[in-house]
């Protein structure tokens, strides 16, 4: 029997088959979970719907997390289709492309607001709206990146947004913990996705990454999916408020020196 047999939940953040959220969805599907998916706009619906149908999804709904009305509508549909949910996957981030290159000093007020609202506040908004839908032992995960803790060139305002996301995750874990709901984050190493392509210099960062890690390799959406599976299953039943790194060990390295 699969680890998630009989469990139902929502996955937000599948844009295409390269998305980290899709890597997660495949792992959850393999272990018997039933999932609902969301998309933003018609162009993305054409990509997301066939993927969702390939894993037998009964719910595929539009949801722009910048809109409380969209979030409320999504949760109303979720209640109709699933009743309660056992998990929620938040794999959403956005910043204007101009904010993801060059000097951090040129961050604009509006660019800061958008990045923080879509990439960090959205987790709070979703959990607030899903509050009475979450099963007593539900598990929620979000996706973050080490640029929240240390400076990564060009990541800029998204680093600040991820720091806010990680802190929000901890406050939510403390708030919902007393009723058994867990909230954790996966801090993933670089994966070549649509969102990542908006960050200046990403290709070169991705190329250099493997050599700098203890495991000497890049990570995949499948790696993230398998850790997500653990965090969303009962196997991680005593883990909440944590950031789990899926980065081939990159974050433990202080200085990467060449061999010999
Ligand atoms: P992705 O495939 O482009 O997924 C990003 C998702 O965010 C897309 O589905 C996108 O939908 C969605 N999104 C953006 N604005 C939204 C909004 N207003 N409402 C609802 N959804 C919205 O890229 P990804 O790399 O898999 O990103 C997933 C998560 O992993 C993000 O939180 C990202 O920061 C994180 N992460 C990525 C990496 C990496 O190297 N790729 C590393 C660490 C963490 P649209 O395309 O329709 O806007």
Image: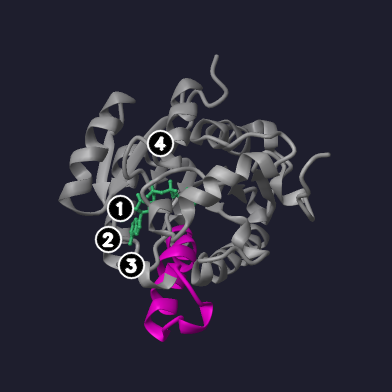
Q: CB at mark 4 closer than 8 A to ligand 1?
A: yes
- Other residues around mark 4 within 10 Å, as few (<14) / some (14–19) / many (≥20): many
The residues colored magenta run 100-127
Q: CB at mark 2 closer than 8 A to ligand 1?
A: yes
**Residue 222 vs residue 95: left or right?**
right
**Which label was assigned to residue 66?**
3
Secondary structure mostly seen in the magenta stretch:
helix
**Label 2 to label 3: alpha-carbon separation:** 8 Å
Query: Image quarter for residue 112?
Result: bottom left
**Label 2 to label 1: alpha-carbon separation:** 6 Å
**Label 1 to label 3: alpha-carbon separation:** 13 Å
Q: Earlier in the sequence, mark 2 or mark 4?
A: 4
Q: Which residue is mark 2?
A: 70
Q: Which residue is mark 4?
A: 22
Nearer the camera: disc 1 or disc 4:
4
The answer to whether mark 2 and mark 1 are in CB contact below 8 A is: yes
Q: Which residue is mark 1?
A: 74
Q: Quadrant of the C terminus?
A: top right
Nearer the camera: disc 2 or disc 4:
4
**Label 3 to label 4: alpha-carbon separation:** 21 Å
Please tell me whether residue 108 belongs to the stretch shown in magenta.
yes
Percent across and percent down for residue 203 are 46, 49
The answer to whether residue 212 is above or below residue 198 is above
């Amino acid at each position: 029997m699969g680890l998630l047999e009989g469990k139902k939940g929502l996955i937000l953040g599948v844009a295409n088959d390269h998305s980290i959220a899709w890597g997660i969805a495949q792992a959850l599907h393999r272990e018997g979970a039933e999932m609902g998916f969301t998309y933003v706009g018609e162009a993305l619906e054409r990509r997301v719907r066939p993927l969702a149908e390939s894993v037998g999804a009964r719910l595929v709904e539009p949801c722009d997390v910048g809109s409380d009305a969209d979030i409320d509508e999504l949760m109303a549909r979720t209640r109709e289709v699933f009743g309660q949910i056992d998990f929620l996957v938040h794999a959403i981030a956005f910043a204007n492309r101009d904010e993801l290159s060059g000097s951090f000093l040129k961050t604009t007020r509006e660019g800061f607001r958008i990045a923080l609202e879509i990439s960090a506040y959205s987790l709070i908004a979703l959990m607030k709206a899903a509050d009475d839908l979450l099963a007593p032992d539900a598990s929620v995960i979000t996706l973050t990146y080490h640029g929240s803790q240390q400076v990564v060139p060009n990541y800029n305002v998204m680093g600040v947004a991820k720091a806010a996301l990680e802190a929000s995750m901890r406050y939510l874990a403390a708030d919902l913990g007393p009723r058994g709901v867990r909230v954790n984050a996966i801090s993933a190493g670089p994966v070549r996705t649509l969102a990542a392509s908006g960050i200046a210099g990403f290709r070169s960062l991705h190329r250099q990454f493997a050599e700098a890690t203890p495991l000497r390799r890049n990570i995949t959406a499948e790696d993230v999916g398998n850790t997500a599976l653990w965090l969303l299953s009962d196997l991680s039943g005593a883990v909440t408020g944590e950031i789990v790194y899926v980065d081939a060990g990159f974050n433990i390295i202080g200085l990467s020196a060449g061999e010999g």
